[in-house]
Amino acid sequence: MNDSVETVKPPGVAAPGKWLLLIHQIPPKPDYFRVKVRRRLQRIGAIALKNSVYVLPSRSETLEDFQWLLREIVADGGGATVCEAAFVEGITQSEIEAMFRVDRDAEYANIVAAAAALEDKAVSRTPERPGDTEAELAQLQRRLEEVKAIDYFGAKGRFAAERAIGAVELRVSPAENEGKPALKAMQGHTWVTRRDVFVDRIASAWLIRRFIDPKARFAFTGAKSYRPRTGEVRFDMFEAEYSHEGGRCTFETLLQRAGLRDRALRIIGEIVHDIDCKDAKFGREEAPGIAAIMRGIVREFPDDPARLEHGAVAFDRLYASLR
């Protein structure tokens, strides 16, 4: 029985050895000026190397962030310089990347704690005030997206934060989920599938964890006629509870049985169908690219939990683009 692993590949690392530095001088008064600059630096994800020296990976968007902040500092009577640098002595690139991950993990941990508190509130909320938790959830979702946007080196806490918010979404959206007893029945299981997972099982596991059963656990078997134990359900395998049905791949079956009506998920189902069933039913132009990514994951990672983990990153990106 295996949980999905918590490590994550960087979403797009900067060119090796290239960093942007913001070196600023701020007058001691007024106090609000220093506070404003510090908050702006936090929002763009910069970390402090020394007093008044902040660093970001060198990219077009981070350069723009520093340039805008420089203009604000100068306009308010301070001084600032932005430069590109490579570190030779005193600190290594891996040490700087670790500093970024520590900061992002702390923010993800705050989101997890806030999500847990909101889930408790959702459980005990009164029907007369349903909007309170929805508004707080929307705010928390926005905060997660903000942190992910400055997670330059793939902090491990991201998946825990996404799962925590996913659990709250199932609690806080009664209008969407109350009429779906099938969805509730699909929660709280260990999900068993065949070993050596590929596109349909990787995508299905992502769908399960992300939208159906946020606390799902996954197990893998080599037995063709595996019989589920108490608390287990099978997917994409012989006589499974969730598998190919009526021309649908397993991902499509899960979508239908859970009653999910998300356009982006439907498109992903069509992509997965075209790759898995090889019938070009939907003719999705994204299918060859996604198939190539899945083949790369399979070749690089021989163990199934790692394939699910890295496949989830790919499908997160695909889902975000389709939304």
Image (tube, rainbow, N blue to C red):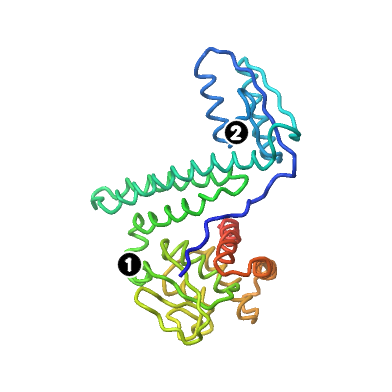
Amino acid carrying mark 2 in the image: Ile
Amino acid carrying mark 1 in the image: Gly
Tell me what residue is drawn at x 58 percent, y 45 percent: 151
Res 87 quadrant in image: top right
| Image position, residue 126 (x, y; %) | 23, 51
Which type of secondary structure does the marked residue at label 1 adopt?
loop
The numbered mark, 2 or 1, whose residue comes first in the sequence reads 2
| Image position, residue 215 (x, y; %) | 41, 62
Say above or below: 223 vs 129.
below
Q: Distance between the residues labelled 2 and 1?
A: 46 Å
Q: Residue 179 carries which label?
A: 1
Point out the frontmost of discs 2 and 1. 2
Q: Residue 207 carries which label?
A: none
Residue closest to the eye, 38 or 92: 92
Res 279 quadrant in image: bottom right
Q: Name the residue under label 2.
A: 47
